[in-house]
Every structure is written in C-alpha cells, then in structure tokens.
Image (tube, rainbow, N blue to C red):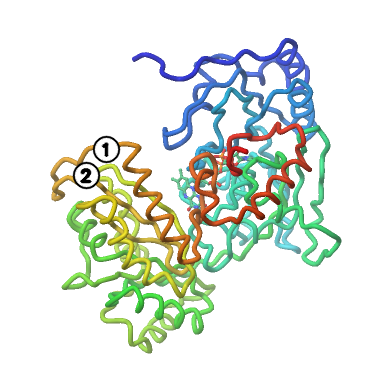
Amino acid sequence: VPDARPPVPPAPDGLLAALRAVVGEANVVVDADVTAGYERDWTGRFVGRTPAVVRPGSTDEVAAVLAACTAAGVRVVPQGGNTGLVGGSVPLAGEVVLSTRRLDDVGPVDELAAQVTVGAGATLARVRAATLPAGLDVGVDLAARDSATIGGMVATNAGGLRALRHGPMRHQVVGIEAALADGRVVSHLRGLLKDNTGYDLPGLLCGSEGTLAVVTRVRLRLVPVLAHRATALLAVASWADAMALVAGLRRVLPGLEVVEAVDRIGVDLVADAFGIRVPFTPTPAVAVLVECADVRDPLDDLAAALADRAEVVDAAIADDPQRRAGLWAVRERCTDAVATLGVPTKLDVTLPAAELAAFAVDVHAVVAAVAPGARVVVFGHVGDGNLHVNVVVRPGAGSGAPPGPDPGADVHERVTVAVFAEVARRGGSISAEHGIGTAKRGHLHLVRSAEEVAVFRAIRAALDPAGTLNPNVLTPPA
Ligand SMILES: Cc1cc2nc3c(=O)[nH]c(=O)nc-3n(C[C@H](O)[C@H](O)[C@H](O)COP(=O)(O)OP(=O)(O)OC[C@H]3O[C@@H](n4cnc5c(N)ncnc54)[C@H](O)[C@@H]3O)c2cc1C
C-alpha cells in the first residue's frame, strides 16, 4: 500500500543534537516505524508526520525541550496517551511531538487532604491503582482509562462517566505545574482548597488542549470509593418526561451518579443487533438508566424515589452486579449497534436543560432536511445535558445485514453543519467532552463570539508569543 502521508519534514540543523543533549539519545525517536504510532490519532482520521518524537523524563527536561524548539522556530505538539478524539494530539504540519508518557510518577496519597500529586504522563488507571487501596478514587472515569493520561485529561477537561456527580476534570484539579513554550516553569501544587491569590492557573489550563503550556504535574482532589451500587432501567414516554425525571431524582437522591438515556430507535437497534433483552414491551420512547452509589446499599432509596415519579411507565431495578450489567448493556452497546448499520456521523453535543427534549425530537427533521432517509439514533449522558447524535446516512438493512457504505466526507460535513447550527440556535455547545482540536476549529464561531475568540488568541499570544505550541488546534486559522 503506498504511503499517502506527507513527507517527513527535516529538522533544522542542530535541533536534534540539542534535544539529545537534553533527554538523551534514546529519547529522541526518529525511526519511522516507531514515530508512526505517534503520528496517527485514535480514530485514524488524522494522520501527520514528525521529524522526531521527544520523550522528556522530568519537568526540567520538558522546559529545556520547549526552549530549544522555540529558539529553533520549530512547533511542538504535546501528546499524552493519544486517545483524544478531535485530532489534537498528532503532528499535522510536521511538528515535533513532545510525549509526556515518561512523566508517570505517582506521589504518595495524602489521606488527610484526600489529594495526590501525579506526573502528567501517568495514566488514569495507574493513578487509581495507587489511590483505591486508600479508599479514595479520581472523580473522573472514562473507558480510555488504561491509556489516557492525567495531563491529557486536564488539557481536554475530560468529562466521562461520573461528571453528573463529581464534575469534569476542571473540578478535580487543585494544583498544577506546567512548562511554558519559552522554557519557564509555573508551579502551584499546594492544593489549598481556599487560595484566592490571583488568576486560577489550573482552571486556565483545563481545556487548553496543549496550546498554552505543557502540563507536567497535577495535584488532584480525590473522592471516596463508593462500593455499593443500585441501577434502574426505566421506560418513559418522551424526552420531556426523561428531563422531568432527571430534575426530580436529582433533588431527592444525593447518591445519584449516572443518568443515561437511549431513544426508541437505539433500544430497538441494540436488541436487534446483539439479542439484548429489553425488559419493556412495547419499546418505550426513551429508556433511562439511573445509577446510585453510596457507602451502603442505595437500592431502597432508589426504589422509593422512583415510586414517587409519575414519568416512570415501567421499571427494572437491580443491585447485584450481574443484573446491573444486563441493564447497563442497553446503554453500553449503543455505539456498537450503530456501527452495525453503517458509518455514522457522530456528534457529541450539550444542550441547556430547557432545550434538550425539543432538540432530541427536532434533530430528526434537521437531519432529514439535508440527508433524506438517514437513520438518527440519539443517546447520551442526559443527566449532564450531553447527547450523542449518531446519523447513518446510508444505513444497511439491519438484522445482521451488512452495514451500509461510508457516505463520504462531504456528507458527514453537511450533517455536522446542520446539527451544530441547531445546537447553537438553542444555546448549546458543539463539544460536550472531547474539545475542539482540529476537528471542530472551523465551527468554533457557532458557539464562541468574535470577542471571545479574540480573547483566546490574546491569551495564547501572552503565554506563547512565538506560537510554538499546538498550532493546529482550538482557535481557527487567523
Ligand atoms: C474509548 C474511548 C473512550 C473515551 N471516553 C471519553 C469520555 O467518556 N469522556 C471524555 O471526556 N473523553 C473521552 N475520550 C477521549 C480521550 O480519552 C480524552 O480526551 C482524554 O482526556 C485524552 O487523554 P490523552 O492522554 O490520551 O491525551 P492526548 O490524546 O494525547 O491529547 C489530547 C489533547 O491534549 C493535549 N495534551 C496531552 N497531554 C498534555 C499535557 N501534558 N500538557 C498539555 N497538553 C497536553 C494534546 O496536545 C491534545 O490536544 C475517550 C476516548 C476513547 C478512545
């Protein structure tokens, strides 16, 4: 197969030697077979080339690498676990890749403060392995936990499975250390809960997608491990009822951790594709999955709260792992079930609570206007207002028939523009969790004013005047 990637750009004279002097010969990787793994993103949609992958092992080395690249006029893409989904972690225009994976130290768990300081390259799984024995956990969890790094999760402000209860990554970070593009280091790792001494650097770097600084160490607040769980799958008659249910349960269930929803098309698809038993006949307009977690069994509290809710047409409830897994399957298999139909346009959006129900209904007409005959499946983290809109423009026949063909980039873009415009019209966000990256920078104007984008650019210019860091992401080209 011919190599369709752009040619490897040459590094300026002397740069590789300077980098080797900082991190050692073995940590400046130029072998194309090895760099290939850093040049392609997780989705396979974004592929670039790099003259070198540099793997610093300390904050000082990160700072020196950045100073050398800035002095040489070479741009740098920071990369953690490379699990990002918007193309922000790969060198699309010949940048040097700065891999943080060697910065993987995990400090002792501070049980008095319920905090821990970790290297930016430590994976979420590695950090949790250190904290769980102390009865403490990281407040954010996501399926990419074995590869996603804490630095990458900060840089993307990752949301994940427990955002309803603990908030996204921004709510977990109580201290940060980072290297600026010119080699200076800012470090504020004391982790004081109350510390009103100026601008909030953790808040600024959360969601900055590698454009302002390279995060080197992070102080995280930790949450208690809640070993007891109760789960319910509920049939409701409409998205409006689903939203009323969320609001009602939130008021009476302090242990509420998860509220997910799947529309009728999604529920039928999961049942059809994988033979998963759905405990309701007929299939409801929306199936809502609710889970509570606590230090004691929350089953009775959950059952009592549900008994009071008129929106619940039918319910299945469980607290044993096997039956809970059966209920979860209806939600967890949605992504795979959509893939059996064809190649979806996948959109991860947030709606204001007051708009979500109407959007979930109207999005079908919005898509039909630009892609007649498309299948639209809506599911997501409804407790956070976060919906995944999946559009299969050329679906197969289902029931084991082959999936339909990829409709092509133009069609995906047409659907994306239509749905994003509807999201923006209703005051929502075009990126719930994954960031803007390269994939969505052309759509940023839909949800951020010209004044806001100008402020973004000014902040970038203040921290990185030479424009070294991650030039292809977040702000649209000037
Ligand atoms: C199976 C799967 C499930 C997922 N589930 C979720 C989910 O539930 N919720 C969610 O929010 N995301 C999810 N993601 C997306 C992804 O895991 C997150 O965006 C994660 O935070 C990325 O971490 P990473 O270390 O892989 O970062 P990378 O992909 O390496 O980088 C992501 C961005 O952060 C920058 N960056 C990385 N490290 C640093 C650093 N130290 N300093 C500065 N910038 C840096 C990069 O330049 C890039 O712009 C999922 C991904 C997969 C593959």
Q: Residue at x 37, y 13 (%)?
A: 2
The residues bearing labels 2 and 1 have C-alpha atoms spaced at a distance of: 7 Å
Q: In the picture shown, does residue 115 fall above or below 119?
A: below
Return the mark for residue 284: none
Residue 407, given in percent of the width and then of the height, sits at 27, 39
Return the mark for residue 406: 1
Residue 7, given in percent of the width and then of the height, sits at 51, 15
Q: In the picture shown, does residue 97 fall above or below 187?
A: above
Between 474 and 44, the one nearer to me in the picture: 474
Which image quarter: residue 65? top right
Q: Are marks 2 and 1 in contact (CB under 8 Å)?
A: yes
**Hey, what amino acid is under mark 1?**
Asp
Disc 1 element: loop
Residue at the disc numbered 2? 394
> Does the beta carbon at disc 1 come under 8 Å from ligand 1?
no
Viewport quadrant of the N terminus: top left
Between 232 and 235, the one nearer to me in the picture: 235
Count neighbours of disc 2 (C-alpha within 10 A) and say few if under 14, some if 14 to 19, many if 20 or more: many
Q: Residue at x 40, y 52 (%)?
A: 347
Q: Residue at x 66, y 29 (%)?
A: 76
